[in-house]
Amino acid sequence: MADEMIFHVKPSFAASARVNASRFGVMTNHAMQNPDPYWLEQARRLDWFRFPELAGNGSFDGDVRTSWFSDGTLNASVNCLDRHLAENGGRTALIWQGEVEDAVRHVTFRALHEEVCRLANVLKGLGVERGDRVATYLPMVVEGVVAMLACARIGAVHVVMFAGFSASGVAGRLRDCGAKLLITADEGRRGGKRIPLKTITDQALLELDGASGGSPLHTVLVVSVTGADVPMQAGRDHDYAALVAAANPNCEPEIMQAEDPLMILYTSGSTGAPKGVLHTTGGYLLWASLTQEIVFDHRAGDVFWCTADLGWVTGHSYVVYGPLTNGGTTFLFEGTPSWPEPGRWWRLIDKHQVNCFYTAPTAIRALMREAPASLSDTSRASLRVLGSVGEPINAEAWLWYSQAVGGGRCPVVDTWWQTETGGIMIAPLPGAVAQKPGSATLPLPGICPVLVNDKGIPQHGESEGHLCIDRPWPGQARTIWGDHARFVQTYFSTYPGLYFSGDGARRDADGYYWITGRVDDVINVSGHRIGSAEVEAAFGTHDKVAESAVVGIPHDVKGQALAAFVVLKTGGEDADAGLEAELARHVGQELGRYAAPDLVILASELPKTRSGKIMRRILRKIATGEHDQLGDVSTLADPSVVQALVERMKR
Ligand code: WTA
């Protein structure tokens, strides 16, 4: 039984680990018993202009206004760059590997610092001020990292948008955050194809201009990635490289309050449009830095490869802020895992001597299918720690990762966390905690998970329930941009006094946590969070669609896939040939290809309760063919709808 499998910490690993079992115990006790001194001690890992005297303030009750280190001042870019210059300015801060094999850049801390300062001056010259929002819509290129740090340097709030978003997705986010300036590229590369980012940007900006009230966005900087000839609108669009080359390479950092916003990052929830999760400077940076060091047993100079896109929180915390604050070399890959050949990632690990590799179960499962052939001719001997994030990892994938990729040498850290938590919350510290395949294991020091049953009562010992967190921690989101009431409602109203994650989990007899997946209407496709409401809204913009319901169904590689039940305005199920595919494409265009459903089922009606609520539980069973396990359908307004759908699926 995989559940019973346990991988003990190797004494040789523990001997030189950052945190061994006894240190882990000390940290955990200290964090629980003397939280303020503990967190202030941790805060020493950052460089402050003024070191804080205050640690945490506030609670998860009432209005949920929490702050950390609020009398401290610092700058995030100084912590990522300047602090390393004196002794390690010549060390590689970032290795960029292009999709083309020979396209490689090694950027030292000194060079990165210089480019960040130049861009910071460009932004200032274009009227960006402290507190203004600056958005990016870029592929995986060095400029993506530079842009984030340049914003941090001048106190602007960065809003990084995944390059897979559609024009409407970009417009919606720009509108919500009120960005003044956008940094994009001519094109991105993806699996041998080109993504026309500037063209999509132009469409997004047209949509934005057309919106009521207009938009404060006045400037677009365009990075030349492929060198494509793209239209530039005079007065609005500027060539990034030309401005940066002409700018002053020195830029004094803004002195930021710990609670000044650092970033807004959009993420999907159960309801409504994606929400702008806001992280502040001091607490977030501490959390990214501390967790990167202790969870991955990081050493200055290590080459750290987190495969996440910069557009997701994993890219923020573990491509940029974690490794760079800790003086690591972060590795940025422009391409996709298996292009042009299946073993590309493994070859890159050898080529760049990567020490720590951090990816998602979806990728692991896809790569597992291509093995063992794809692993041959690679040694992966440089690897010391392997990490997993984004979705539950099944034991089979875990074991393959540990044994085939890591050669049985490397601990596997399965890390549970979320956009809202800022960084890793539950994970085995590799020198301290034995691993069980499929379990995220134990909380980090200072983190207090609580499992709540369906009656809202916290469970003790071995149990299962909704995963909540008691007690604030430094890395947590402070609010939803422009909508604090939604923040309180979404995370703190279900179980008053607790942060509710939206995930379910089980705790075993050893106190280990096993995340079972979302318990709300968020669907996790290939580690990407997609809200069913968002996809349903996208269907709603198609002129033939009256109504739809989207559910997640299990998928071998992606973890979950989207299945959509769609009711047409004509009411009929017998629509034009190919309409299902057209509807899926439509959603892809509205939201981005990553959110296009795998399965579209035309229905004449959806199963609803008498109060009109769609019964997704039943739709999930129907979509997976578990027709005999529909459970109680007596609360439905019209139970015959279910039978009709089952018949439809059989056809
Ligand atoms: C899921 C990504 C199981 C979970 C960092 C969570 C996981 C959502 C794990 C957050 C894990 C993340 N095991 N599930 N190790 N890590 N998740 O905001 O459902 O993009 O709520 O943050 O991913 O996704 P997000």
Image (cartoon, rainbow, N blue to C red):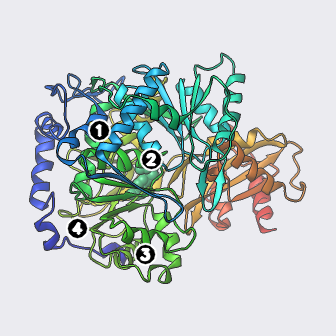
133 and 236: which is toward the camera: 236
- Residue labelled with disc 2: 142
**Relative horizontal placement of residue 223, taking residue 349 as reference (left or right):** right
Residue 263 position within the rendered picture, expressed as x and y whole percent measured from the top left: 41, 33
Q: Secondary structure at mark 2?
A: helix
Quadrant assignment for the N terminus: bottom left
Disc on res. 359: none
Closest to the camera, between mark 3 and mark 2, is 2
Quadrant assignment for the C terminus: bottom right
137 and 88: which is toward the camera: 88
Q: Secondary structure at mark 4?
A: loop
Crowd around label 3: few <14 · some 14–19 · many ≥20 (10 Å) = some
Of labels 1 and 2, earlier in sequence is 2
Crowd around label 4: few <14 · some 14–19 · many ≥20 (10 Å) = some
Spatial CA span between label 3 and label 4: 18 Å
Disc on res. 434: 4
Residue 349 position within the rendered picture, expressed as x and y whole percent measured from the top left: 38, 68
Amino acid at circle 3: Glu
User: Looking at mark 1, is its residue's CB closer than 8 Å to ligand 1?
Assistant: no
Spatial CA span between label 1 and label 3: 34 Å
Crowd around label 1: few <14 · some 14–19 · many ≥20 (10 Å) = many
